[in-house]
Image (cartoon, helix red, strand yellow):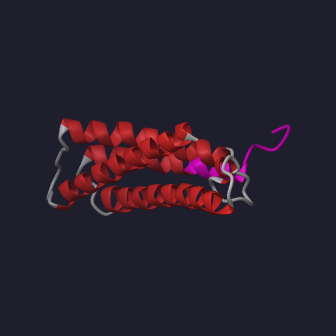
Amino acid sequence: MKRVTFGGLLAFALLGLFVYAVVLALIVAHNCRRTCSLTEGNAALLEAIGALVSAVVISELSVTNPNEAPGTRLAARWNTDKQKTVVIALASTYIVVWLVTGLGLVILGWVLKPTVPQLASAARAWLGVAVAAAYAYFGVSPADGA
C-alpha cells in the first residue's frame, strides 16, 4: 500500500501545481487589456503539468465502469470499508478539482478573456482531453462495422 499512498500524494501534488499554474495564468489574463504573455516557466508548467494531471484522470476513468465511482478499482486493494470510502472520495475529489479547474481555464481563460495565447492553447487542449475522458468513462466507441 506504500506505493499506492506515494502515488496518490504525487498525483495530488501535481494537481496542486496545475491549479496554481491555472490561477496564475488567469490572473495575468484578468490584468491584461490587449495581448499578454505568460512567463516561460508558467507556460511550461501549465502545459506539462496539465498534461500529466489529465493523463491521470483519463487513466482512472478508462478503467472505471460508468455505474461505479472513480477509485473503485483502487479501493478494492484496501481492507476496511472506511479505507475504501476514503480512497473513492479522494479519487472523486481529484477528478472534480481537475474538472472545475479545467472549466475555469476554458471559460475564464479562453471564452471570456482570450488575451493570453498560451492560456487559450491550454484551454483548448484541456477541452480535448475532457472529451476524451468522457468517452473513456462512458465507453463510447464507434458502432461495429462503421
Q: Percent position (x, y) of residue 2?
A: 53, 39
| Above or below 60: residue 112 | below
Q: Percent position (x, y) of residue 10?
A: 43, 41
Q: Is residue 52 left or right of residue 22?
A: right
Q: Residue at x 71, y 50 (%)?
A: 76
Q: Quadrant of residue 84?
A: bottom right
Q: Percent position (x, y) of residue 27?
A: 20, 58
| Above or below 72: residue 59 | above
Q: Is residue 49 magenta?
A: no
Q: Which stretch did the figure color magenta?
A: 131-146
Q: Residue at x 34, y 55 (%)?
A: 110
Q: Nearer the viewer, residue 123 or 41?
A: 41
Q: Is residue 106 left or right of residue 62?
A: left
The quarter in which the C terminus is drawn is: top right
Q: Is residue 135 magenta?
A: yes
Q: Residue at x 44, y 38 (%)?
A: 52
Q: Nearer the viewer, residue 66 or 89?
A: 89
Q: Is residue 58 left or right of residue 16?
A: right
The quarter in which the N terminus is drawn is: top right
